[in-house]
Amino acid sequence: MRIQGLQKLTLLDFPEKTACTVFTAGCNFRCPFCHNASLVVHISKEAEISEDDFFAFLNKRQGILDGVCVSGGEPLLQPDIENFIRRIKELGYAVKLDTNGSFPDKLMHLVESGLVDYVAMDIKNSPETYAMTCGVDALDMASIEKSVSYLKEGHVPYEFRTTVVKNYHFKENFELIGQWLQSTEKYFLQNFVDSGDLIGKRVTGCSEEEMKEYLQVVQRYIPEAKLRGI
Ligand code: SF4
């Protein structure tokens, strides 16, 4: 496992759990608004955290933390992700997986093996603008759609979420996203915030009014949709 970051405590990222977040290095997408460029395009060997150190930390936090968020980068890109999560589960932690949804078969396998307790999948944009939004020319949109369909079947608790960026998201995109995801239970719109560690340049977030307007559009199809972080 290529581990490049560890947030030792989060009360926000894993619903109803006190958790930590482990960040894996590498991603097959190049979203210009990615706020973890150092995990995607500027991966530094020096920042690596060994598995031994990570599991030593988890051993010490047993009984204090309930869960581990496995984030990235794209965690499903890691060849040994299954064993890694299995070791976390063996210590008694619940596991939340953050994914861009481009590896549906791996996602299904982990869920069906009982290794994942919650999935958060990014919805980058409406289908016809997806490739542009995630910075990949040859995007396999069928994989994204397969992950969406699988999660909507309810095999595991999940959420969809979209980071809203002024440069890429417009009212019509949310109309199409609403139609695509309709009948899903949890969908969050979160405004882009510049972390100072971006892949692209001149990327900006939206105003609160714009966020509320987009939420209204989406709520026609997904009444439970919410804004996050506003
Ligand atoms: S925001 Fe995009 S580029 Fe960054 S980790 Fe997520 S999927 Fe990869």
Image (spheres, helix red, strand yellow):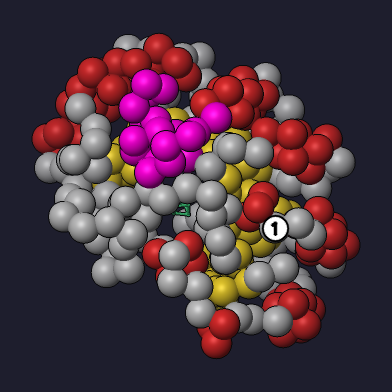
Question: Where on the picture, by quarter, is residue 166?
Answer: top left
Residue 191: image x %, image y %? 27, 46
Examine the image and state in which quarter residue 123 appears: top left
Which residue type carries mark 1? Gln
Q: Position of residue 163 (x, y in %)?
A: 34, 43
Tell me residue 148's x, y (percent).
Answer: 57, 25
- Most extreme residue toward the front, as rendered? 138
Q: Nearer the viewer, residue 89 or 193?
A: 193
Q: Is mark 1 within 8 Å of ligand 1?
A: no
**Is 177 or 168 nearer to us in this picture?**
168
Report if residue 101 is visible in the image: yes
What residue range appears in magenta?
122-140
Circle 1 residue: 78
Q: Residue at x 74, y 40 (%)?
A: 106
The image quadrant of residue 125 is: top left
- In the picture as drawn, the residue positioned furthest to the bottom comes out as 46
Using the image as rendered, state which of residue 50 and residue 90 is in the foreground. 50
Q: Secondary structure at mark 1?
A: loop
